[in-house]
Image (tube, rainbow, N blue to C red):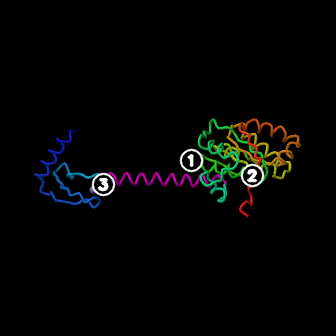
Amino acid sequence: MDTTIMQKAINTIAKRSNDEELRVCPHCGTKYAWFNKSTNSINIHVQVPACDCQERIEKEKEAAKIAEAKKEKLAKIFENSMMTPLFQEKVFSSLKETEHFDLCKKYAAEFNPKTAEGILMIGNVGTGKTTLLAAICNELMNKGFNCLFTTLSALLDKFSKYSYDNAGDITPLLQWLVSFDFVVLDDIGRETYNDKRKEVAFRIIDSLLNYKTTTALTANPEMIKKLQVLPEWKATLDRLKDTCGIHLQFTGKSMRGEKW
Ligand SMILES: [Zn+2]
């Protein structure tokens, strides 16, 4: 209905109403006429002029609910990531610009889980590999992407426990693993193997490759050498290397203990 016609109708009703009274909006202080006209069949309740406080408050409540849900989702993402609080502090804005800093920052900024390349980082301990991957994960998680940030060793422990609790069936956990948008396996080669763990490690890697889950790996050169001499590992390493489109060598000296 046209607003002027509506206003006229309201004024007419207001004049005729015996129940008209002046009220003040408790939120903005706007004075308005409030009346309540009842007949046998209808009950009219109009306020003139209407402020939008009620509507605004509803909208604010809705926005707060959405913000709360987003916060909860984010907390869940961080909780699921297995990332320790120490690494949750690693963000690009507070990091030193070490080797490959710009590339990693750009990678996080442009990340698309469908098209992103995997990353293989090779370098000695303390050259900043893990820190950069943590910074990538933190940025991605803040954007709502699901990331897993762990070592292959910790992941193998998780799988062993799961296998033990579920009569050897690790398929659901493999499905959980490949559902991440970005998986970081830090420090590969350091884990210890028996036949069972080796088999699980290959199933983990196979799943990541087959489901094209974007994966980032770090290793130090000695560990790569150690894995390469193991016959089954050589082929797997080659496959991993092929799926990681980005290869980064870290040649810098160790950053650890620099402050000392
Ligand atoms: Zn108001």
Residue 175: x and y in percent read 68, 43
Please tell me which of labels 3 and 2 falls first in the chain. 3
Question: Which of 244 and 95 lies nearest the eye of the viewer?
Answer: 95
Rendered view: 246 above or below 197: above
Quadrant of the drawing holding the C terminus: bottom right
Residue drawn where x is 84% and y is 42% of the image: 233
**Residue to which mark 2 is pinned:** 127
Say what secondary structure mark 3 lies in: helix
Residue 228 lies in what quarter of the image? top right
**Residue to which mark 3 is pinned:** 53
Disc 3 marks a residue whose amino acid type is Cys
What's the CA distance linking mark 3 and mark 1?
33 Å
Q: Is residue 77 left or right of residue 46?
A: right
Residue 43: x and y in percent read 20, 51
Q: Principal SS element in the magenta part? A: helix
Whether residue 45 is visible: no
Residue 137: x and y in percent read 64, 49
- Confirm or reject: label 3 Cβ below 8 Å from ligand 1: yes
Residue drawn where x is 82% and y is 47% of the image: 221
Please tell me which of labels 1 and 2 falls first in the chain. 2
Say what secondary structure mark 2 lies in: loop
**Residue to which mark 1 is pinned:** 144
Q: Which stretch did the figure color magenta?
A: 53-82
What's the CA distance linking mark 3 and mark 2?
57 Å
Disc 1 marks a residue whose amino acid type is Gly
Residue drawn where x is 73% and y is 47% of the image: 170
Quarter of the picture for ligand 1? bottom left
